[in-house]
Image (cartoon, rainbow, N blue to C red):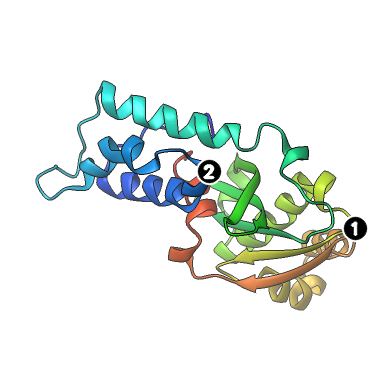
Amino acid sequence: MRDMKVPETKRQVRRLIGFFSYFRDYIKNFAEIAKPLTDLTGKRIPNKIPWGDKENKAFEELKMQLCQATMEPMQIVDFDKPYVIEVDSSDSTIGAVLLQTAPDQGNKPVAFASQKLTSTQKSWSTIEKEAFAAIWALDKFSKWIFSKPVTLYSDHNPLTYITESTTKSSKLMRWALALQQYDVTFKFKVGRANVVADCLSRLND
């Protein structure tokens, strides 16, 4: 998250605001801090946004506060509660977030992750990328979720794809075997609602 690129267009700014807004309960004075960014979405602002010191300061402050929310995960994680993972893929990157539901605060972030795809992985179909993102995220967060129930949200159904196609590919067979070590339930979440993983998979392209 610290390495997120500065947005260049209104669409990227809206995606960024959606990302931080999702965790606004953990960002003190969110609306005030984010105002220089939300101002960039105004009608009079060109699509190629102007970016100056105040916008950069707001961006860095939002990142810093959200990073602090995950700096000491032992104070955040309740090992008796189930986990939620959200994943997404773009043409060249995958992203994921590990969450737990906190009373009266919605989903609380535990960890964020993103990774660029190799040239071979970039040529995969969208469903292959989504399936790989799921396997990769489960492995990335395994130190928290191993032997615990976890719900994984994606805007495709990687479980169906992997299980129904294993006989066609040794790669998918390896993925199917990897899934067996986790207590995971897959659920669909429409892309526009999957704001966190979507942002992580696209703003770092």
- Position of 33 with respect to 158 (left or right) is left
Q: CA distance from mark 2 to mark 1?
A: 28 Å
Classify 59 as above or below 135: above
Q: Decide which of 125, 21 is in the foreground and name it.
A: 21
Mark 2 vs mark 1, foreground winner is 2
Q: Position of residue 35 (x, y in %)?
A: 28, 39
Residue 167 visible (yes or no): yes
Q: Nearer the viewer, residue 6 or 29?
A: 29
The answer to whether 13 is drawn above or below residue 36 in the figure is below
| Dot 1: element | loop
Q: Are marks 2 and 1 in contact (CB under 8 Å)?
A: no
Amino acid found under the numbered disc labelled 2:
Tyr
Is residue 191 or residue 17 the one in the foreground?
Answer: 17
- Say which residue label 2 marks: 26
| Residue at screen point 39% across, 45% down | 16
Q: Considering the numbered disc 2 on the image, is that residue within a helix, a strand or a loop?
A: helix
| Few, some or many residues within 10 Å of mark 2 (<14, 14–19, 20+) | some
Q: Callout 1, which amino acid?
A: Ser
**Residue 75 placement (x, y as % from top left):** 74, 39
Figure check: 134 above or below 167: above
The image shows residue 81 at horizontal and vertical percentages of: 79, 59
Mark drawn on residue 147: 1
Place residue 38 in its image quadrant.
top left
Observer able to see residue 90: no
Q: Position of residue 29 (x, y in %)?
A: 40, 38
